[in-house]
Amino acid sequence: MSANDSLDFEDGDVVLALAKRKYRVHKAILSQKSSVFAEMLAAPPQPKSPVYNRLASGRPASMRFNFESIEKQMQYAALPTLQLHDKHEPFTLFLHALYDDPLHIYFPKLAKNTMFLISAVMDLVDKYNVSQTEMRMKFFPFIEQDWPTTLAAWDENELFVQHLKEELEKSSQLEMLDEKLPEPASILRFAHAYTLKAQVVQEVPSYIPAALYHLSRLPPYADPDDMERHGHDVEEGMRTAKRTFLSHQDFVCLHHGIYNLHLAASRIAFVDFPREAEKFAGVPASEKKAMELWWRSAGMKSLLGPDRMDLLAELRDLMEALGEQETDDRDVAILRQGTNRPYRNAMRGYLKRERENLWKSLAEHFSLNTFFYR
């Protein structure tokens, strides 16, 4: 038995009727996956509807031009019908999931409405008593698609956003950037609202560290409801977060994370990078001096400047400066003149390890296991 895109099966034996949509589906599938549907379908069958009787007795002249539509109405009307009051978009996704259909075509990368659709689907999961575990396995990968668990996927998303920003900028629509991308605070509210009821001790969802990290790099006034937000910020494509969605625990985790990320930046800037650069063997003192001067003029400024809120991005940019890409940056040009490639590659490798370790320790930085579900 294979499903189709319209969820209108020729061999379907029950009709689910919503205000704007009807689905001809199978009782066996519904009853197997949902105890609520099983109970509803166990009720005595209803007699054929007045619509069926009217259509079967003859077609009014005004309707003859749409013969196929009338035949379909008769087929629907001849079947038992459940009148439901759900919204058709999430309900369609819900049915596709019950039929084990592929769902990726409905969730493009970094779409604005992904979180709201999945929230609505999870409400249907509760309403119709469908397995939470099974439905989470089907839908939660699309949350992780936007708020990933790996640094490589995070970097891929950042590149996607950068390309989108460039496209909007070319068409003078940069102010639309925030309207096209997911809102981060809603994902935290989702995590609190849709916990696994069977678990006494809740595990922090894997998508939370990425969402909190994104929140940490937004200024406090980057809220669509904040009156301090200036028109210039909108024109520049500022990302925002609805802070009214955040709980007390969320704010505790967020501020822990911001504090710990600043500590990590200071440690790298003042202690670890200078130490790694100095202890590298086989490098002349002149090259170490050149590296030190570049780090003081560029590295420390990148990590510790007052407007530096994205440590992952700053470390990535410093890695690129130590690479071999063409650049117009004067400080980088001086560094490359004064140091050899193996030395720069070694320091680039150090920054790469720091960046990877930072990503892996985000949950610890934000104190998630201590405060998120407290």
Image: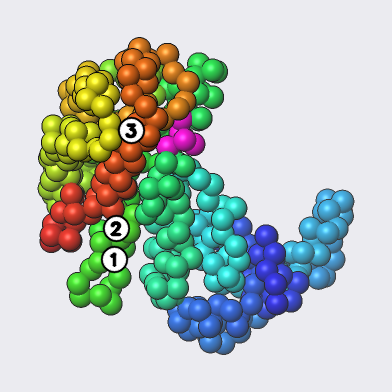
Determine the secondary structure under disc 1. loop
Left or right: where 112 falls relative to 330: right
**Residue linked to disc 1:** 195
Labelled pair 1, 2 in contact (Cβ < 8 Å): yes
**Residue linked to disc 2:** 191
> What residue is at 18 percent from the left and 50 percent from the top?
366
**Residue linked to disc 3:** 343
The front one of 49 and 132 is 132
Q: How many other residues sit within 10 Å of disc 2, few (<14), some (14-19) or many (≥20)?
A: some
For marks 1 and 3, give the one nearer the viewer. 3
Determine the secondary structure under disc 3. helix
Above or below — where is 111 with respect to 364? above
Left or right: where 25 falls relative to 173: right
The residue stretch that appears in magenta: 158-162
Residue 140 counted in the magenta span: no
Above or below — where is 206 with respect to 217? below
**Alpha carbon distance from label 1 to label 2:** 6 Å
> What residue is at 20 percent from the left and 72 percent from the top?
201
- Amino acid at dot 2: Ala
Determine the secondary structure under disc 2. helix
